[in-house]
Image (cartoon, rainbow, N blue to C red):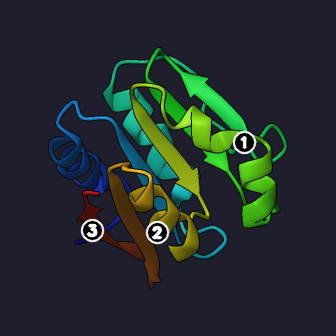
Amino acid sequence: MIVGLDDIDKVVETLKKSIADRDSVVLLQGDLSSGKTTFVQRYVKSCNIDNNVTSPTFSLQTMYGDKIFHYDIYNKTFDEFLSLGFLEEFEKSGVHFVEWGGEELKNMLLKFGFRVIVLKIEHKDDKREYKIEEFDA
């Protein structure tokens, strides 16, 4: 789906239908400034949660409401991510958005029985292309 920033809510609604109140880990993949944090902002807003959503680059994890978790693992290796105990965080009920979550993380999460959704965001001139892939363990 290729949309401009004004139409990002269409992608949010599509993702919400895919999640359908199921615990999920959403891996956000895209270049710098592709809109990963912006997408989480719009998702949180669509849930009527009034939080200031920013990239958790230095805090690593932020929580919005009771069931929306946001991680940024840009500057962490896969082993660092595991050693910090984030695998256990995914056991909490809700939706877990992970910026910079790659194939290695996806495969590990599936191996441990987590439901994974990959949201790939790509620049297309003044718009973004969003691709949603669902994986069940």
Name the element at disc 2. Answer: helix
Amino acid on which the number 2 mark rests in the picture: Asn
User: Can you tell which of label 2 and label 3 is closer to the viewer?
Assistant: 2
- Mark 2 Cα-neighbour bin, 10 Å: few <14, some 14–19, many ≥20: some
* Residue 5 picture location, percent across and down: 39, 58
Name the element at disc 1. Answer: loop
User: Can you tell which of label 2 and label 1 is closer to the viewer?
Assistant: 2
Amino acid on which the number 1 mark rests in the picture: Pro
Q: CA distance from mark 2 to mark 1?
A: 23 Å
Name the element at disc 3. Answer: strand
**First reached walking from the N terminus: tag 2 or tag 3:** 2
Q: Quadrant of residue 118?
A: bottom left
* Residue 116 picture location, percent across and down: 36, 55
Which quadrant of the figure contains the C terminus?
Answer: bottom left
Q: CA distance from mark 2 to mark 3?
A: 13 Å
Amino acid on which the number 3 mark rests in the picture: Glu
Label 3 belongs to which residue?
A: 133
